[in-house]
Image: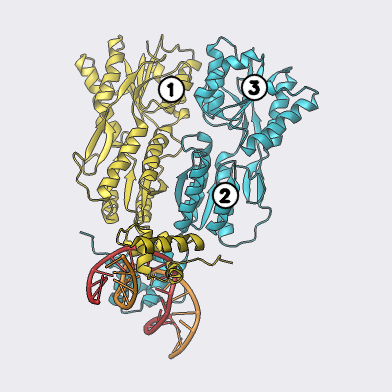
Chain colours: A cyan, B yellow, C orange, D red
Amino acid sequence: MDKQTVTIYDVAREAAVSMATVSRVVNGNPNVKPATRQKVLDVIDQLDYRPNAVARGLASKKTTTIGVIIPDLTNSYFSELARGIDDVALMYKYNIILASSDENHDKELQVVDNLTAKQVDGIIFMGNQVSKDLRDAFNRANAPIVFAGSVDPEHQSPSVNIDYVAAVTDAVAKLVGRGNRRIAFVTGSMDESINKDYRLKGYKQALSSKRIGYDEGLIFQTDYSYKAGYALAKALQDVKATAAFVGDDELAAGVLNGLTDAGVKVPEDFEIITSNDTRFTEISRPTMSSITQPLYDIGAVSMRLLTKLMNNEEIGDKTVVLPYGLKKRQSTK
Amino acid sequence: MDKQTVTIYDVAREAAVSMATVSRVVNGNPNVKPATRQKVLDVIDQLDYRPNAVARGLASKKTTTIGVIIPDLTNSYFSELARGIDDVALMYKYNIILASSDENHDKELQVVDNLTAKQVDGIIFMGNQVSKDLRDAFNRANAPIVFAGSVDPEHQSPSVNIDYVAAVTDAVAKLVGRGNRRIAFVTGSMDESINKDYRLKGYKQALSSKRIGYDEGLIFQTDYSYKAGYALAKALQDVKATAAFVGDDELAAGVLNGLTDAGVKVPEDFEIITSNDTRFTEISRPTMSSITQPLYDIGAVSMRLLTKLMNNEEIGDKTVVLPYGLKKRQSTK
DNA sequence: CTGAAAGCGCTAACAC
DNA sequence: GTGTTAGCGCTTTCAG
């Protein structure tokens, strides 16, 4: 039933050389006489020999596989990052084991242990909470890890990001500059470091620089979904907000449509600025102003960084910060 | 530098049993005396032993890893499928090696060979063209394969889908029923079997049943992107189409916004119906009517089917067809 | 119920 | 340049 698998041993026999030599030519080791190499290559071709990566992994202790932990595959923010990761991984001949965490703590732990068992050479982590347990699991993995588009609250792991504090400060400052005094802050859970430690900080900074008081009532924590945003419309009106900074584009689209459907005119009566510049910002009507981030690059750079780490290459700063921007579209005046 | 890895041998020694026994308890083999089992378990716990999946894979010839080939991670259609796949894979303890193909033929071949080298136990394929080369690569993999949300033109491989012909027929029939005579057919490449053999067939069927002539000029092939759709607006007006069936939601959003920005009123002057019922259909304004598909389920069922195949279980029909629907939203009258 | 031993297919010293 | 020989860490007969 199994097609007879041809092994390195078969090739060695047919080519009348040792396994070691075959291994050398397969791995591009230069210490092989051209004639021998050619002979081996011919046999490989003729037998259609294909190295078994599992055996190779066991013997060499390198699997050329990395683990990518992603909170939600269907969220464009993460899938854009993943695309960057994937492209660079391919370039360096790594395969990706993709593991969804659903932002669920136990699942994250489980997933990291799985990846560890599979002997991945490195891990890219997306997510914004790192418990002690999770940190331990990372350490057990005995593989380098980099945070992509996610913040390591304790600055222990390498990461690639934008300057979230500055970006949100800028965004909210724009809103303030246009006369808004009651600006809602709408994001996911405040348990996430990116919200609690970065975005909120930027928000407060923008307010206080203009001497606007901070009002708890304007802070909205919810999940990153269209529905959740849509449902927020009434509450936003109730607190008499005239603008909102939103931490996720799909969430922002929900806020936008919820408001619009409730008869609120955006941007005339309510301005919205969102965070990730994914395609949702172009599709909604009005289109949404947003912080811009080089999502693909964040993923790509993360993966590139990981390859260096896996090769024990010297790296400069382990926190790389990519540039962000602000893109005005129709949801702000 | 490497944390000393503890092996099955260490556990055996500490527990004063043989490796075989440790292996048995790790794998839940019932042929172990409870007392022995407990002793081993204790040692495992104490040493924090974790089985090496690579070694296991080599010895058992099962990697508990499957390959998932996906054309575009950032396309909601595929990422929703992937979520279904992922959930069920987790349930059955399989890991997923995700491989992007970008609908690129050579890359697909490369990817399948990679997965084969990594000894995946099975493959889930998303994509709609299967060349002879690719088919050969599948066979070489010596692992079962199922097509998810994708059509196997030659009906050789198991697949899970909806009835695309019927769905498109219904969708276009609605458009016809409302008096449209010039209905554009907008999809990706006609090289894809799903477009050429299924959707187009449904389109023609709907037209001919109402005795409407088929006009080549109404057929638009482009890529599945917002931009491409947006750019189509003028051409659509030029051919005096009054409605369009679109094969992808992002593409449809582009058509919608392109038309709207060109001053065409949807649905009053132009009706649009799209295909995948992803979140874009809710976010756009007007919202888009669509064929509805159980995307998550298609992914989940595909994975479930694959597990059966991997276990050599008997399966009924290898082509499973899930139900579709039609959801009226604002882009149709 | 348990152990001994032979691999799984490959890499990596180490000789020659 | 090339071959020999140990393993890598685990599963799996096969005995007993």
Answer whether labels 3 and 2 touch (C-beta < 8 Å).
Answer: no
What amino acid is labelled 1 in the image?
Thr
Q: Position of residue A318 (x, y in %)?
A: 66, 52
What's the distance in space between the residues labelled 3 and 2, CA to CA?
35 Å
Front position in the image: A42 or B28: B28
Foreground: disc 1 or disc 2: 2
At label 1, counting other C-alpha atoms closer than 10 Å, the crowd grade (few under 14, some 14-19, many 20 or more) is many
User: Residue at position x 38%, y 55% from top?
Assistant: B114
What's the distance in space between the residues labelled 3 and 1, CA to CA?
24 Å
User: Residue at position x 54%, y 32% from top?
Assistant: A278
Quarter of the image with the C terminus of chain A in it:
top right
Front position in the image: B38 or B93: B38
Q: Position of residue B98 (x, y in %)?
A: 42, 47
Tell me, yes or no, if residue A52 can be seen here. Answer: no
The quarter of the picture where residue B176 lies is top left
Q: Which residue has dot 3 on it?
A: A244
Q: Earlier in the sequence, mark 3 or mark 2?
A: 2
A94 shown above or below B156: below
Q: Which residue has dot 1 on it?
A: B281
What amino acid is labelled 2 in the image?
Asp
The residue lying furthest to the front in this view is: B35
The quarter of the picture where residue A151 lies is top right
Label 1: chain letter? B
A200 shown above or below A322: above
Q: Is residue A301 left or right of residue A47?
A: right
Q: Position of residue B268 (x, y in %)?
A: 41, 9
